[in-house]
Amino acid sequence: MMKPVIGVTPDFNAGDRKDMGGAEPTYFLRARYIRAIEELGGVPLILPLVVASADRRRLLDCVDGLLLTGSGPDLPPRLYGEKQRYQFPLVSQRRADFELEMVHQARRRDIPLLGICGGMQAVNVACGGSLFQDIPAQVPHAMDHRQKTKAVSVSHTVTVVPNSLLRKIVGKEKLMVNSSHHQSVKAVAPSLIASAVAPDGIVEAIESPTHRFLLAIQWHPEFLFDRHLVHRRLFEALLRAVRRTRA
């Protein structure tokens, strides 16, 4: 059987950043995402952020599953019906538009999809949910979700909801994760459910109960998959869902 192809979304500098290419429009992506897919038997395909809807649909014809990756900048709050209340860099409009349409198309076609960090936020917004624009400002009792240690180490627990897809994948109620975000899900989209929460109540995972495989998590398993078997299972589950789809 041919290896499954997983489309991976990159970040994009439109030429207005000081880092990652500066004034030169540039794609960039952590190699860890690619390595995770490749080592577990998939073929990663980095997706160009094409503009035309027809071209985006054509890209989806070429993949068996999707991985929406994390990003430093954040989604524009107007995408979930709010004004920007705090200072933070925004993800490029090109990437925001592309990823939101990828979510819509993946749901329509029932293509297996895993969202990570900013990818989780994109899934929630695409499905009609909203975000906390800044956890420290809007959730005073919250822990610091920007760990001081390196991302290859874990910093806090999450509680996984019984009978959820995530629970079936990880096989346990408590899970240690890393943490590198200042935004999070506020209102879970109507078609999704929360499947993991942090001790302070911040939503750490969401999923669709009606699709074959639509799971999104707030932490970064690409930093942990080669050291912690439980995080490796997340990528394995995506590939397994794809193989079932193709069978």
Image: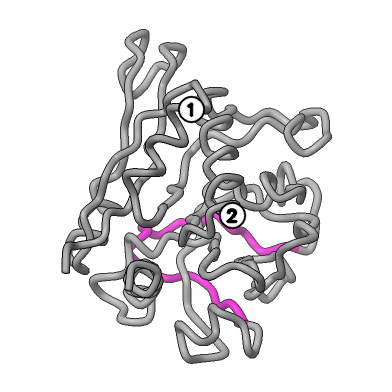
Q: Main secondary structure of the magenta part?
A: loop
Q: Considering the image in quadrants, where does the N terminus appear?
A: bottom left
Q: Which residue is mark 1?
A: 54
Q: Would you place residue 63 above or below residue 203 in this image?
A: above
Question: For this rendering, which residue is in front, 177 or 242?
Answer: 242
Q: Position of residue 8 (x, y in %)?
A: 35, 46
Name the mark nearer the viewer: 1 or 2.
1
Residue at image location 29% in from the left, 40% down from the top: 46
Q: Would you place residue 17 above or below residue 38 in this image?
A: above
Query: Of the numbered discs in the image, which one, if any, rests on residue 107?
Result: 2
Q: Is residue 45 left or right of residue 221?
A: left
Residue at image location 46% in from the left, 47% down from the top: 70
Label 1 CA crowd tier, 10 Å (few <14, some 14–19, many 20+) = few
Q: Position of residue 51 (x, y in %)?
A: 48, 21
Query: Is residue 92 on the magenta stretch?
Result: no
Q: Considering the image in quadrants, where does the C terminus appear?
A: bottom left
- Kind of element beneath mark 2: helix
Q: Is residue 107 left or right of residue 148?
A: right
Real-space CA distance between mark 1 and mark 2, rounded to the nearest whole angstrom? 17 Å
Q: Is residue 203 left or right of residue 158?
A: right
Query: Is residue 152 on the magenta stretch?
Result: yes
- Kind of element beneath mark 1: helix
Q: Which residues are magenta?
A: 142-160
Residue at image location 67% in from the left, 52% down from the top: 124
Q: Residue furthest top?
A: 23
Residue type highlighted by circle 2? Arg
Question: For this rendering, which residue is in front, 183 or 104?
Answer: 104
